[in-house]
Image: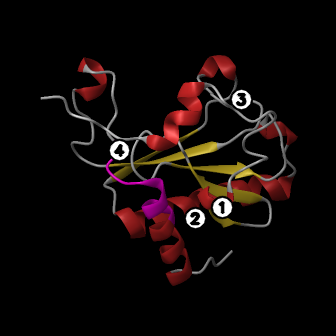
Amino acid sequence: MVQRIWAPWRVTYVTGKRKKGCVFCQKDSRHVIEASLHSYIILNIFPYNPGHVMVLPKRHVRNLSQLKYEEMCDLFQTVERARFLLEKSVKPQGFNIGMNLGKFAGAGIWKHIHVHVVPRWLGDTNCMPIIAGTKIISASLNSLAKLLRVTAKKFPRKF
């Protein structure tokens, strides 16, 4: 029996139809969870785990050194905000938080810096990526966006 894993949002990636320019600067508002003065929290549309979000400066910059002091502070306050929202909404047991700076460091979009915030749970890794080259994501982007926005309203930003 053949098992099917549905991930219709990946069709653009698979077919190679991509918008010109920076995808972060042309972000889809359906995937924006919250915005601060200088930063956004957005869902990663090719997530590693359910709830995988990215925090990025509104201004298009390649390097941390290009950020103004206020933007740097806001970016990392927003990283903490993203972590908090995930903690309250999807209740992970831990987090991976980090950046891939540069194309050869693994950044898929390396011309606009961003911070990955990935919720983790005991047992969230399995043999599927090794055996079948497949990662199973157990929640839709729309349901996660709705849950995170509801959580953001329940816990207003204090900074």
User: How is the rendered protein coloured?
Assistant: secondary structure
Whichever of callouts 2 and 4 sits on the residue coming sooner in the sequence is 2
User: Where 79 falls versus 112 (above or below)?
Assistant: below
CA separation in Å, label 1 and label 2: 6 Å
Q: Amino acid at mark 2?
A: Arg
Tell me whether circle 1 and circle 2 mark residues in contact (CB < 8 Å): yes
Task: Magenta stretch: give its range.
Answer: 137-145
- The spot of residue 141 in percent (x, y) is 47, 54
Label of residue 77 in the image: 1
For image coordinates 20% across by 33% down, the residue present is 3
Which type of secondary structure does the marked residue at label 1 adopt? helix
Q: Is residue 12 visible?
A: yes
- In front of the other: label 4 or label 1? 4
The residue type indicated by label 1 comes to Gln
Residue 158 is tagged as none
Q: Residue at x 63, y 57 (%)?
A: 41
| Marks 3 and 4, the one that precedes in the sequence | 3
Quarter in which the C terminus is drawn = bottom right
Residue 116: image quadrant is top right
**Mark 3 or mark 1, which has the lower sequence index?**
1
Q: Nearer the viewer, mark 2 or mark 4?
A: 4
| Residue at the limit of the structure toward the left, as seen here | 1
Tag 3 residue: 110
Task: Please indicate, yes or no, whether residue 46 appears anywhere in the rendered image.
Answer: no
User: Which residue in the structure is indicated by mark 2?
Assistant: 81
| Lower position in the chain sequence, tag 4 or tag 1 | 1
* SS state under label 2: helix
Amino acid beneath label 4: Ile
Residue 136, compared with residue 79, is above or below; it is above
What numbered label is drawn on residue 137? Answer: 4
